Image (cartoon, grey):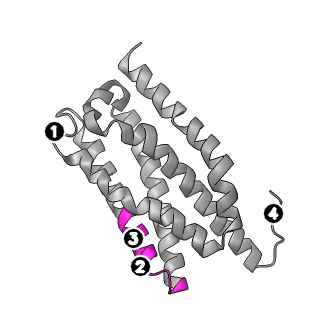
Amino acid sequence: MSPAFIFNVHLVLGYIPWLLCFGAYVWPRLKSMDQAEAQRAIATLHSFRFFGLVFMIPGVVGPNLPSDFATVAAYGDFATGLLAMLALLSVRTRPLFQLFVVAFNLVGAADILIDYYHGIQLGLPALAGQLAGAYWIPIIYVPLLMITHVAALYLLMRSQLNVVGYPEPRT
């Protein structure tokens, strides 16, 4: 098997255990929580995205990791992490908290999708070994991040529908 094939298998299969775990343990808890507390829990996870800057540290990643990928991925993660931290710092000011929650989820989800696109365009699967010590990030951490972005955006949309008078969806 080629490294590109193995990397692609890792990317796809990385979602399955997280979806199973999230569906069984995390999602039921998030749905039962107050909206702000659920968003706060998700923001806490995303506040650690500052370590995406590791993609730009020689020695942690290989010298042939495309700099176009590394820079965009690193700064997208960094921006998302900072926005999540701002959400956590503003939790007592609900309108500001909501603004930062929306911002970090939109920026973070876009970052992941853009990184997938850039990775494909730059042939990252064939260069997966250049991720070196950061290989685990797209395989283990990114699936959880994407799943929680989808969950957070769903919770936001659900709360907005309730505000305008739509009934609570059955789940």
Residue at which label 4 appears: 169
The kind of residue tagged 1 is Gly
Q: Earlier in the sequence, mark 3 or mark 1?
A: 1
Residue at which label 3 appears: 85
Mark 2 and mark 3 in contact? Answer it, CB < 8 Å.
yes
Observer-nearest residue: 18 or 158? 18
Residue sitting at x 51%, y 70%: 101
Mark 4 and mark 1 in contact? Answer it, CB < 8 Å.
no
Q: Where is residue 20 in the image (x, y as percent from the top left)?
A: 64, 41
Horizontal side of residue 131 vs 43, given as left or right: left
Q: Which of marks 3 and 4 is nearer the N terminus?
A: 3
Number of other residues with Cα within 10 Å of mark 4, as a class: few under 14, some 14 to 19, many 20 or more: few
Residue sitting at x 40%, y 45%: 115
Asked whether the viewer can see residue 118, the reply is: no
Badge 4 element: loop
Residue at which label 2 appears: 89
Mark 2 and mark 1 in contact? Answer it, CB < 8 Å.
no
What is the spatial separation of the Cα atoms under label 2 and label 3, in whole angstroms? Answer: 6 Å
The magenta region covers: 81-94
Residue positioned most to the top: 1
Asked whether the viewer can see residue 48, the reply is: yes
Quarter of the N terminus within the rendering: top left
Q: Which mark is residue 59?
A: 1
